[in-house]
Image: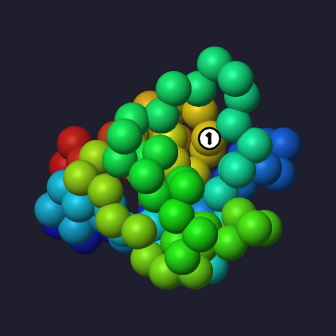
Amino acid sequence: MRLELQTVSRDNLFEAKAVYIDGVVTVKKGSRINTHAGSGFKPSSVVREKLNDPTIVGEDGILTEDVTFSSLSTAASFVAGRTSNGMITWKTMDGKYVRESLKN
C-alpha cells in the first residue's frame, strides 16, 4: 500500500510531507521539523542519530535529504520533536488520519 502523507503543527513548529509504502515511511526532503524539542523528549537512538546529523537536518530544521523510518510513530516523533502517535499525527493528502486509510 502506498499513501502520500502530511503533518502540520498548530503552532507552526513543523510541516512535513512523507510517503508510506508497505510499512516504511520516508519523510521528504524540504520538510521542516521541530528542532527545539522539550526537555522531556527522550528520542530513540534512531531519531537522535538523524536529528544530530547536519547532513540530514539543516540549521533551520529543513531536511536536506529524504529520511526513512520503519514506523509511522518514529517518523512522527522525528518531525514533531516529541513523542507522537504516527497513526494520528500523519494525515493523507485529503485530510484523513492515516489509521483510517490503513483499515481499508
Look at the image and tell me whether residue 84 can be seen: yes
The residue under the point 37% across, 40% down is 45
Residue 54: x and y, percent?
A: 59, 69
Residue 36 image position (x, y, % from top left): 75, 43
Asked where in the image residue 14 lies, by quadrant, the reply is bottom right
Please state which of residues 3 and 33 is positioned toward the viewer in this rendering.
Answer: 33
Residue located beneath label 1 in the image: 81
The crowd level at tag 1 (other Cα within 10 Å; few <14, some 14-19, many 20+) is many
Within the image, what quadrant is residue 85 found in?
A: top left
* Quadrant showing the N terminus: bottom left
Check disc 1 and report its element: helix, strand or loop: loop
Residue placed most toward the observer, 58 or 2: 58
The coloring applied to the image is: rainbow
Going by the numbered disc 1, the residue's amino acid type is Gly
Q: Is residue 12 above or below residue 53?
A: above
Q: Position of residue 17 (x, y in %)?
A: 54, 68
